[in-house]
């Protein structure tokens, strides 16, 4: 399987401190990968380097084999990398439907969505997304009135509207109830079958629900990589988590 994303010797220093150090990472097309690591391990910085928010001191980021190191976040986003921060980050005063509508990929589609609301193709696509995130019945509710979990799902729907090839989710279950967390896992499993996904997560019950392969970071370096079972047996990983 070809890699959708690869990093080679990725390193960033802040005043001499290596927040991410010599990271070699590879994600296959269609893979769902969990990134684990204690606070300060470098997970957020790693995602910032992939999405162009932070520029590396050395090393490369390849997207489908093309070197995207040093590109600006908007350029990387245009190339098909979508990121959801902890959020939720939605337009509070718009309806659920409108939030998805304004997130549709490309200006042409936004234009069509805004000025030709009856455009069937767009409506079908929005309908499908709302169904997938289970908010169809609340399509005309104003976003501010949704629960925390629903707002998180709406933001995932907004990301889907941009049709990214690679999706990065930063702690998508932060602040959720156990039930909402479980539902998010089901959503991610079904939603992204045809996409590549990176999920940065702490919540181990959630990780058990969704994980196939896990990458563990510690002090900016890759500590371990493998199936969840392998990771849980790994003595280096156990030590790091016991020390927390
Ligand atoms: P995680 O997301 O795993 O909790 P981070 O990537 O946020 O870890 O942080 C990794 C380390 O890098 C931390 O020690 C943090 O203080 C440091 N760091 C992150 N960004 C900066 C920055 N812009 N300047 C200085 N230090 C930073």
Image: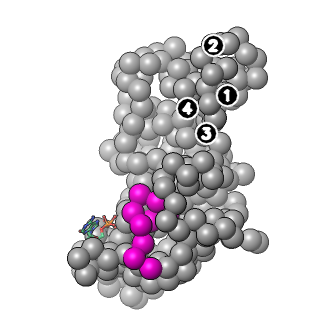
In depth, the one of 58 and 80 nearer the eye is 58
Question: Residue at the spot x=41%, y=26% of the render?
Answer: 91
* Quadrant location, ligand no. 1: bottom left
24 left or right of 67? left
What segment carries the magenta color? 49-58
Circle 1 residues within 10 Å: few <14, some 14–19, many ≥20: few
**Residue 29, position as x, y percentages in the image:** 70, 63
Chain-order first, disc 1 or disc 2: 1
107 up-or-down from 7: above or below: above
Circle 2 residues within 10 Å: few <14, some 14–19, many ≥20: few
Chain-order first, disc 4 or disc 2: 4
Circle 2 residue = 115
19 left or right of 101? left
Question: Residue at the spot x=74%, y=71% of the render?
Answer: 2
Circle 4 residue = 103
Q: From mark 3 to mark 4, how far is it between C-alphas?
A: 6 Å
């Amino acid at each position: 399987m070809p890699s959708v994303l690869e990093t080679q010797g990725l390193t960033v220093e802040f005043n001499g401190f290596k927040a991410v150090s010599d990271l070699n990472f590879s994600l296959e097309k269609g893979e769902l990968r969990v990134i684990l690591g204690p606070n300060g391990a470098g997970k957020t910085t790693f995602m910032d380097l992939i999405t162009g928010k932070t520029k590396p001191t050395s090393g490369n980021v390849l997207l489908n084999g093309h070197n995207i190191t040093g590109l600006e976040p908007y350029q990387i986003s245009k190339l098909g990398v979508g990121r959801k921060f902890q959020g939720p980050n939605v337009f509070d005063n718009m309806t659920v439907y409108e939030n998805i509508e304004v997130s549709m990929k490309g200006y042409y589609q936004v234009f069509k969505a805004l000025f030709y609301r009856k455009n069937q193709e767009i409506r079908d696509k929005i309908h499908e997304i709302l169904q997938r995130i289970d908010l169809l019945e609340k399509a005309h509710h104003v976003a501010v009135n949704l629960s925390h979990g629903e707002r998180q799902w709406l933001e995932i729907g907004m990301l889907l509207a941009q049709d990214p090839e690679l999706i990065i989710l930063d702690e998508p279950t932060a602040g959720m109830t156990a039930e909402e967390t479980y539902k998010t896992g089901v959503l991610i499993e079904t939603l992204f079958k045809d996409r590549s996904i990176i999920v940065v997560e702490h919540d181990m019950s959630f990780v058990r629900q969704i994980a196939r392969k896990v990458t563990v970071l510690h002090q900016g370096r890759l500590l371990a990589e493998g199936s969840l079972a392998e990771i849980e047996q790994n003595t280096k990983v156990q030590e790091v988590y016991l020390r927390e």
